[in-house]
Amino acid sequence: MTIETVGVIGAGQMGNGIAHVMALAGYRVLLTDVSQDALDAALVTIRGNLDRQVSRGKVSQEDCDAALERITTTLTLSDLGASDLVIEAATERETVKQAIFEDLIPHLKPDTILTSNTSSISITRLASRTDRPEKFMGFHFMNPVPVMQLVELIRGIATDQATFEACQEVVAKLGKTSASAEDFPAFIVNRILMPMINEAVYTLYEGVGSVKSIDESMKLGANHPMGPLELADFIGLDTCLAIMNVLHDGLADTKYRPCPLLTKYVEAGWLGRKAGRGFYDYRGDTPVPTR
């Protein structure tokens, strides 16, 4: 399978990062979203991140300019129909993803590979709602995409070997490393990471430690580059809660029950960095713990 054009659905934090690395690797990229403001903001973010790479000597100015020229934006989902590979990077809600696939499928070429950047939802179940389960798989980038080196590749029960190998080749061309994960809730990284974050929230909820003491303990005592609560804010507390719900529902084990405090923060709209408040308040010059 020759992949030259990549369609990316969703211009948020993950989508613009995927568009960035794909364009830099030489792929033509068509980025779509339901909001023109989101597309405009994505291009600003991509340009800023590429300029940062140029200033640090990681990317040449020529490669930066060429990458930006390879990215086209559109509000029309059907425009992605001619893509060789489509990566869905919409919000982590299964109903939203299913609706996107249903709208897109009539416009796709027969040999287009369809993938999802989902961090937790069943690939087999998503694939079953399409006309090409054998050409459907999980293509899970880590955040921030331009920096993180791992990509989880998840095969559904029907995914064929040619599709898997084609996606492996794309990851290699990006200069990243792929890890093959089985189609179980949250796959590898989030199956391990999210329960740790959830346990950190329980530690806060039960008064074992404050936000500052929990994060400092894990940074200095376990050599983590970020504390678990700081990391949760970076990921987005709504995303953390969604993944914990998938784990709890999919594995039917009480050890995956989301902490009530995590639910409360999400209900308050305190979703982390993107909302200005989470376990830290980011509205001032320096983040301040909220508990």
Image (spheres, helix red, strand yellow):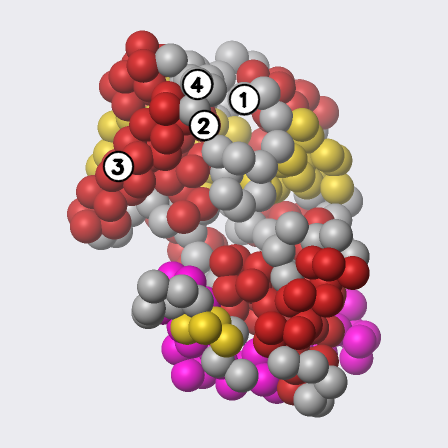
List the residue tagged with mark 3.
43
Q: Is mark 4 on a helix, strand or loop?
A: loop
Q: Earlier in the sequence, mark 3 or mark 4?
A: 3
The vertical placement of 264 against 5, above or below, is below
Frontmost residue, 115 versus 228: 228
Which residue is found at the position 51% from the left and 68% from the top? 237
- Label 2, label 3: how many angstroms apart (C-alpha)? 13 Å
| Amino acid on which disc 3 is placed | Leu
Residues at circles 1 and 3 in contact by the CB criterion of under 8 Å: no
Instruction: State the mark number for residue 174.
Output: 1
258 drawn magenta: yes
Which residue is found at the position 43% from the left and 18% from the top? 57
Q: What element carries label 3?
A: helix
The x and y percentages for residue 38 are: 25, 49
Instruction: State the mark number for residue 21.
Output: 2
Disc nearest the viewer among 2 and 4: 4
Instruction: State the mark number for residue 57.
Output: 4
Residues at circles 2 and 1 in contact by the CB criterion of under 8 Å: yes
Q: Which of marks 4 and 1 is nearer the N terminus?
A: 4
* Side of 194 where 237 appears, left or right: left
- Label 3, label 4: how many angstroms apart (C-alpha)? 21 Å
